Image (cartoon, coloured by chain):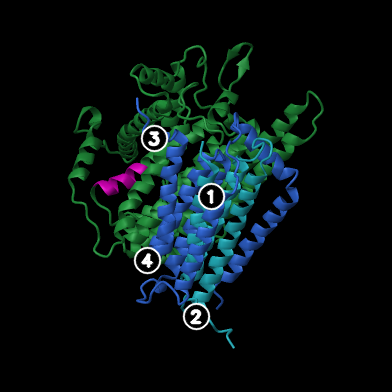
């Protein structure tokens, strides 16, 4: 008996008319959504703590350690501080849009949780179009940033709003196409079926290691880079580049409204990691996840938190890219590569391989993906080398510039 | 189950709002928004008639048409807004009453 | 028990109540597009309407079209329109009325069209029952098959159209010095 059936029976026992049976279903969905959303909000507190701890360790600091054990309640204290702050609306702001923008930035992120597969039988709704649903939600955040940037009546906020649109729209294309690769492989957009497809049987035992990242490393790398840009994390944090834009599109916001933008960003980073785990890292699959059901959610959360820590590691180590570099990387490297990958995968999957030779196609898909990885790493490496020399030059005394080997300007 | 007439009424309202915006607004962008409203109204009708068709599972023509409309609307908006920006750059106005340079 | 003079209408089902809420949202959005004086508020109303229409598609069990609606209309078209409004923001603060000379006539025409359509709605014999859709995944599969078989020519032409529109938009909006 499912949860909503139980509610229906309770309702009938209490003497409610049968026409109202749908109410039980609605209540069941509401309770489910309520629990998931509130858990996500609590999760955000932990995420912020993790970020601060990881980044401070990288920067040779200790990080928050005063409130609670290991400083765990520091975020709670910060949230209380933000709640008690004055909520300021600039004089000439567009009041309605200014008030709505933080809400619009949080709600698509929270809606993501509906299709996330935490465990074999634990998913909010197994939509027919689960992956596409995730893509569509990602595109709503752009509107929120634009609303915030415009309504604040501030030049820097507007400039950041323009940057948001440029960055998020550009990186959405490679991200969506990379997400298409596992969908093509399985032939479904249901998140739960994608998770099931990533099992690996040795005899009767499911090792749970048939992760798509082993077959599609190129698509995974492209997804990861694009997701970094989509979640506005370093090295793509141009939207809140403190040294250029003061803060970004949320510069005029204070108190809890500012906190909502912050919340949206941290949760978005986490959920994009969760999507990466669902599509490429085997979701809840892992050794013995079938035998011990409790291992499923543990594997899933462990993988997602691992992804999150990797993102924070990148945040602590990488410098910010310039806006022209960011745009050209998306349009000149990622989009052509991912188009090539998808095309290659489709052709190789549909070629009439002779019986017992179907694996050749998959081997070639893997080869194409490895090629894509090599190209991305080469472009990035070349870029980092030229930038290194450039920075060195900038700090050299003038007399030495002529002595140093000339640097080709290419590689941007 | 939602009655077909409800969809059609909603679509009719949206179509007429769009018609009013397209005919009565002064700004070219507002006119474009009105046209978008009308296209969406047509799309609601396509989906509603698909849903009330004889075999909605096998016969998905209504959905196919709706997707074509969405794609064509995207192309239309891209070209339309490019035109609007180009006009604004040359004439410093988007007031359609003032864009009467072709009038004899 | 005596018969009530007015029969109580049947209570709305889940689908019907959801549809009513979404329709209200859509109507408010459409009203904002038409009536708000600030062009930016028009654009926000338009985004709201697009959302509402996507919700209508979900109620009609056309999930794929609904998601495409959110992706294309809310994600791309609303953003583009907002962008265009920002680039031409000199137009926003004029003291002139947002309506042109023929606005009165336009209102009459729109109202007449609505009355005629509503009248037709009431008088025509529409189908009353819809076929249940058991597995929505088959619908999406059929949609995909349709695009590459029956409608393949239109599909390819659409691809060409989008490419031409892309190139054309860039050429038109380019700043010629």
- Give the distance between the C-alpha atoms of the residues marked 4 and 3, in whole angstroms: 44 Å
Display colour for chain B: cyan
Local packing at callout 3 (Cα closer than 10 Å; few below 14, some 14-19, many 20+) is: few
CB within 8 Å, label 2 to label 3:
no
Callouts 4 and 3 on one subunit = yes
Q: Identify the mark nearer the N-term, 4 or 1.
A: 4
> A381 and C145: which one is in front?
C145
Q: Identify the mark nearer the N-term, 4 or 3.
A: 3
Q: Which mark is residue C38?
A: 4
Image coordinates for residue B92, horizontal then vertical, percent: 46, 79
For the colour blue, the matching chain is: C
Which residue matches tag 1? C122
Residue drawn at the location 24% of the way across and 64% of the way down:
A91
Which residue matches tag 2? B91
Q: Is residue A257 magenta?
A: yes
Local packing at callout 2 (Cα closer than 10 Å; few below 14, some 14-19, many 20+) is: few
Callouts 4 and 1 on one subunit = yes
Position of residue A359 in the picture relative to residue A338 (left or right):
right
Image coordinates for residue B58, horizontal then vertical, percent: 69, 36
Mark 1 secondary-structure assignment: helix
Q: Chain of mark 1?
A: C
Mark 2 secondary-structure assignment: helix
């Amino acid at each position: 008996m499912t949860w909503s059936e139980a509610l229906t029976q309770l309702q009938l026992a209490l003497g409610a008319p049968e026409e109202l049976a749908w109410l039980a279903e609605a209540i069941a969905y509401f309770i489910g959504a309520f629990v998931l959303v509130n858990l996500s909000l609590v999760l955000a507190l932990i995420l912020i703590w993790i970020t601060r701890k990881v980044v401070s360790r990288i920067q040779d600091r200790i990080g928050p350690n005063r409130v609670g054990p290991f400083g765990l309640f520091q975020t709670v204290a910060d949230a209380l501080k933000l709640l008690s702050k004055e909520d300021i609306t600039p004089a000439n702001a567009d009041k309605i849009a200014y008030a709505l923008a933080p809400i619009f930035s949080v709600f698509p992120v929270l809606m993501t949780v509906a299709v996330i597969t935490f465990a074999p039988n634990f998913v909010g709704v197994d939509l027919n179009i689960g992956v596409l649903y995730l893509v569509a939600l990602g595109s709503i955040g752009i509107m929120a940033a634009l609303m915030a940037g415009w309504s604040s009546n501030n030049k820097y906020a507007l400039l950041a709003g323009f940057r948001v649109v440029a960055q998020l729209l550009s990186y959405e294309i490679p991200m969506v196409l990379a997400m298409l690769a596992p969908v093509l492989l399985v032939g479904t957009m249901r998140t739960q079926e994608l998770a099931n497809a990533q099992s690996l049987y040795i005899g009767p035992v499911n090792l749970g290691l048939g992760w798509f990242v082993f077959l599609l490393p190129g698509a995974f790398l492209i997804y990861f880079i694009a997701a970094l840009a989509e979640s506005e994390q370093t090295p793509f944090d141009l939207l809140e580049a403190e040294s250029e834009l003061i803060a970004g599109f949320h510069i005029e916001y204070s108190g809890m409204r500012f906190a909502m933008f912050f919340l949206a960003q941290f949760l978005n980073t986490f959920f994009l990691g969760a999507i990466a785990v669902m599509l490429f890292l085997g979701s809840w699959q892992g050794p013995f996840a079938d035998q011990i059901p409790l291992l499923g959610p543990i594997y899933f959360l462990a993988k997602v938190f691992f992804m999150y820590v990797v993102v924070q590691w990148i945040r602590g180590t990488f410098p910010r890219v310039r806006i022209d570099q960011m745009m050209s990387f998306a349009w000149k490297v990622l989009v052509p590569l991912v188009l090539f990958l998808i095309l290659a995968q489709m052709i190789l999957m549909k070629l009439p391989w002779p019986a017992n030779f179907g694996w050749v196609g998959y081997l070639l898909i893997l080869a194409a993906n490895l090629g894509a990885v090599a190209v991305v790493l080469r472009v990035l490496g070349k870029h980092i080398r030229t930038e290194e020399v450039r920075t060195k030059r900038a700090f050299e005394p003038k007399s030495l510039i002529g002595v140093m080997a000339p640097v080709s300007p290419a590689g941007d | 189950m939602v009655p077909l007439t409800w969809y059609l009424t909603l679509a009719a309202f949206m179509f007429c709002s769009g018609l009013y915006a397209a005919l009565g607004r002064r700004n070219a962008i507002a006119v474009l928004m009105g046209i978008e409203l009308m296209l969406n109204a047509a799309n609601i009708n396509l989906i509603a008639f698909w849903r009330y068709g004889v075999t909605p599972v096998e016969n998905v023509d209504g959905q196919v048409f709706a997707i074509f409309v969405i794609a064509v609307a995207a192309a239309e908006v891209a070209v339309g807004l490019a035109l609007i920006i180009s006009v604004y750059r040359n004439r410093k106005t988007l007031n359609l009453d003032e864009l009467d340079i072709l009038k004899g | 028990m005596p018969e009530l003079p007015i029969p109580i209408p049947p209570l709305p089902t889940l689908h019907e109540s959801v549809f009513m809420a979404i329709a209200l949202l859509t109507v408010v959005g459409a009203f904002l597009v038409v009536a708000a004086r600030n062009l930016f508020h028009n654009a926000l109303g338009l985004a709201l309407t697009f959302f509402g229409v996507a919700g209508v598609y979900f109620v009609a069990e056309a999930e794929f079209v609904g998601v495409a609606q959110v992706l294309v209309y809310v994600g791309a078209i609303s953003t583009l329109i907002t962008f265009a409004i920002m680039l031409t923001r000199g137009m926003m603060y004029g003291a002139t009325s947002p309506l042109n000379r023929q606005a009165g006539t336009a209102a009459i025409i729109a109202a007449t069209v609505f009355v005629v359509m509503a009248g037709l709605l009431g008088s025509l014999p529409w189908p009353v029952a819809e076929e249940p859709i058991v597995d929505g995944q088959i619908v999406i599969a059929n949609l995909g098959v349709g695009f590459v078989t029956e409608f393949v020519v239109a599909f390819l032409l659409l691809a060409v159209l989008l490419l031409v529109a892309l190139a054309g938009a860039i050429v038109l909006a380019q700043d010629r010095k």
